[in-house]
């Protein structure tokens, strides 16, 4: 709450400085350009500033994401939705599930060599499920248990209201 109040206080001060500067630039109180004219009226500048979500709003929107919109249901994803699995390290991978969506898969513990060795699914059906299914390394035969699936979202790309539960 305090951060939001602080943001609006800074915004109000910015708005006041814009209006003072706008008078010097030949703009009336409504933001319309006078005879000297501006490329963009003050009102449009303010609307552009308000339309861009803040980092705080983006972070809050991530908490409201519905995993089902990423194909995660009951901690499982359909194998037919998996387009690509790219391990980031020995314990986490990004799964492309189509439509520009990505899922973060975490393993219960480090699975040394999984990035380079290759693996096969050991699933009980047509879905890959956390806590039940495993990945088996080709060369060593080591199995690695899947711990969790979560929507993978980049903070820069989220918009408030996107992916929320209905």
Image: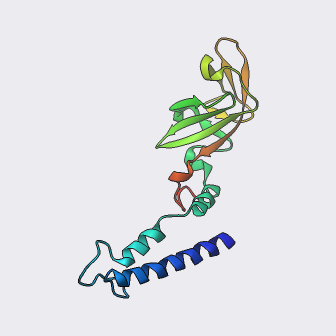
From this view, report whether residue 23 is shown above or below residue 96: below
Q: In this orientation, which residue lies closer to the viewer: 17 or 84?
A: 17
Q: Give the residue displayed 43% in from the left and 78% down from the top.
A: 18
Find the residue positioned furthest to the bottom.
Answer: 29
Find the residue positioned furthest to the top.
Answer: 139
On the image, the x and y values in percent for residue 91 come to 69, 31
Q: Give the residue displayed 42% in from the left and 69% down from the top.
A: 48
Q: Quadrant of the N terminus?
A: bottom right
Q: Quadrant of residue 35?
A: bottom left
On the image, the x and y values in percent for residue 126 come to 60, 31
Q: Give the residue displayed 54% in from the left and 33% down from the top.
A: 82
Q: Quadrant of residue 149?
A: top right
* Residue 1 visible: no
Q: Is residue 70 left or right of residue 130?
A: left
On the image, the x and y values in percent for residue 120 come to 62, 20
On the image, the x and y values in percent for residue 150 come to 64, 44
């Amino acid at each position: 709450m305090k951060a939001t109040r602080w943001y609006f206080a800074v915004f109000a001060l910015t708005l006041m400085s814009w209006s003072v500067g706008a008078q010097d630039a030949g703009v009336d109180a409504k933001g319309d350009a006078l005879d000297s004219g501006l490329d963009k009226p003050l009102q449009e500048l303010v609307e552009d500033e308000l339309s861009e979500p803040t980092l705080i709003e983006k972070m809050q929107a991530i908490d409201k994401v519905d995993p089902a919109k990423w194909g995660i249901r009951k901690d499982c994803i359909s194998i037919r939705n998996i387009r690509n699995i790219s391990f980031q390290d020995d314990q986490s991978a990004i799964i492309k599930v189509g439509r520009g969506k990505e899922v973060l898969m975490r393993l219960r513990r480090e699975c040394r060599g999984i990035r380079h060795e290759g693996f096969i699914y050991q699933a009980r059906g047509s879905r890959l499920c956390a806590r039940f299914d495993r990945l088996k390394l080709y060369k060593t035969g080591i199995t690695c248990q899947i711990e969790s699936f979560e929507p993978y979202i980049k903070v820069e790309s989220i918009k408030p209201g996107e992916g929320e539960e209905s």
